[in-house]
């Protein structure tokens, strides 16, 4: 029996920034490494899409509007059969302000191909009093229902999506949980920690409290409160802000005598991100909706064995409590308390980092994800 060729359809692909962009490339590389035939179809947005050995990358200049879908249909007909389409689904990524019903209708009309759908998100949440947002909520749920009716297999980035999807499905056949692996290297040189701290001018004995993220409006205030508390409690501590937007956020924190103890990297390549994560004694990763297996910022630290403090929320899966791979507290406001415990007990922190690394390797690694896709 001939193995189907993979056709990954995604709204984002490098050099476009974004978690789904990085994820799509990682999956393509993993499938190619397993010697499968891999194609990627993505909007070009006026730039050349990233290319890698073993991956056929197809640019869609017209995106996923009617003209683009016709072009995609014609191009797919030219490819060999059997075909397996893997959709990296985030409604907002396919244009039309997240309301691209024609795209979902096009997918539901496909015949003589397998259709796999990976739900990174389902729909915007219902918000009382915001009628435009709630109209989008209704349309996005209808779009998800179209995909569910057609899909041969369903994958979810977090099990928290399953109840919603089950409620939308005419015939629920279950979903496979497919955690999102780290989008930065999971290994670094042995001296990465020491050389990075030296380059940053961090003295021996100083405790480094890190955060990795994009410093958006929902998360940044949570990080700011925790860091302010921890820096005030002890002079021999510095904050290390890793990721795009950290330099702007640092200027907001550099007050009350802590200006010389807030460092920010700005944008870094993936290898440098890993080295800076390893320079941290503890990572603060608070989230308003809780930690989940969609959070690549947490996955990055977990894979490298960096002790992580995070919090529960309505999207948090039970595995975070059950595994003991992170220090998990009840609310974002309690993250500073959890971090204080680890900063004062390096032995406990090191043990936590080891458990986190094992958890990642056993449950969340790219090898595990690719094996689930190919099963």
Image (cartoon, grey):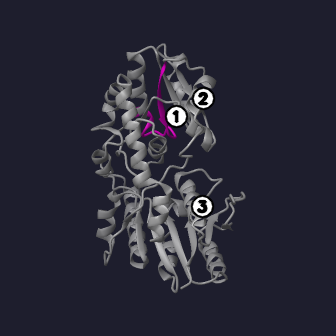
Disc 3 to disc 2, how far (Cα)? 28 Å
Q: Is residue 241 above or below residue 371?
A: above
> Which sits in the foreground, 151 or 277?
277
Total count of labels: 3
Mark toward the start of the polypeptide (1 vs 3): 3
| Image quadrant in which you'd find residue 132 | bottom left
Which image quadrant: the C terminus?
A: bottom left
Q: Which percent across, then down, holds residue 342? A: 36, 28
Is residue 216 on the magenta stretch? yes
Mark toward the start of the polypeptide (2 vs 1): 2
Provide the secondary structure element on which disc 2 rests. helix
Q: Which residue is mark 3?
A: 29
- Span highlighted in magenta in the image: 206-222
Q: Which percent across, then down, holds residue 241? A: 52, 31
Q: Which residue is mark 2?
A: 196
Provide the secondary structure element on which disc 1 rests. helix
Mark toward the start of the polypeptide (3 vs 2): 3
**Neighbourhood count class around disc 2 (C-alpha, 10 Å): few under 14, some 14–19, many 20 upward:** some
Is residue 199 on the magenta stretch? no
Q: Are marks 2 and 1 in contact (CB under 8 Å)?
A: yes
Q: Residue at x 49, y 30 (%)?
A: 280
Q: Would you say residue 291 is visible in this rendering?
A: yes
Q: Is residue 144 above or below residue 124?
A: below
Q: Would you say residue 287 is visible in this rendering?
A: no
């Amino acid at each position: 029996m001939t193995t189907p060729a993979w056709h990954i359809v995604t709204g984002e692909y490098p050099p476009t920034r974004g978690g789904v962009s990085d994820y799509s490339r990682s999956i393509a590389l993993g499938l190619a490494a397993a010697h499968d035939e891999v194609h990627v179809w993505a909007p070009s947005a006026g730039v050349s899409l990233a290319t890698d050995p073993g991956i056929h990358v197809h640019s869609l200049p017209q995106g996923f509007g009617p003209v683009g879908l016709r072009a995609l249909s014609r191009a797919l007909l030219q490819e060999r059969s059997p075909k397996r389409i893997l959709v990296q689904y985030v409604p907002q990524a396919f244009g039309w302000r997240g309301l691209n019903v024609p795209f979902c209708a096009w997918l539901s009309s496909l015949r003589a191909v397998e259709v796999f759908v990976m739900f990174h998100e389902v729909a915007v949440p219902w918000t009382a009093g915001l009628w435009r947002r709630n109209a989008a909520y209704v349309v996005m749920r209808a779009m998800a229902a179209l995909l569910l009716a057609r899909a041969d297999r369903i994958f979810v980035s977090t099990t928290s999506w399953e109840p919603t999807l089950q409620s939308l499905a005419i015939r629920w056949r279950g979903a496979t949980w497919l955690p999102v692996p780290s989008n930065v290297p999971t290994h670094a040189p042995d001296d990465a920690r020491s050389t990075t701290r030296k380059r940053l001018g961090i003295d021996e004995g100083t405790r480094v409290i890190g955060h990795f993220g994009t410093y958006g409006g929902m998360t940044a205030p949570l990080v700011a409160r925790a860091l302010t508390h921890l820096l005030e409690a002890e002079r021999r501590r510095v904050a290390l802000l890793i990721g795009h937007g950290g330099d702007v956020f640092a200027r907001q924190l550099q007050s009350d005598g802590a200006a010389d103890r807030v460092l920010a990297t700005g944008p870094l390549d993936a290898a440098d991100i890993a080295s800076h994560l390893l320079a941290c004694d503890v990572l603060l990763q608070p989230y308003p909706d809780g930690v989940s297996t969609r959070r690549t910022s947490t996955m990055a630290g977990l894979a490298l064995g960096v002790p992580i403090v995070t919090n529960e929320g309505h999207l948090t899966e039970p595995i975070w409590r059950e595994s003991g791979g992170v220090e998990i507290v009840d609310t974002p406001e309690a993250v500073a308390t959890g971090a204080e415990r680890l900063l004062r007990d390096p032995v406990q922190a090191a043990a936590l980092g080891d458990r986190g690394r094992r958890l990642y390797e056993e449950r969340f690694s790219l090898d595990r994800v690719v094996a689930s896709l190919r099963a």
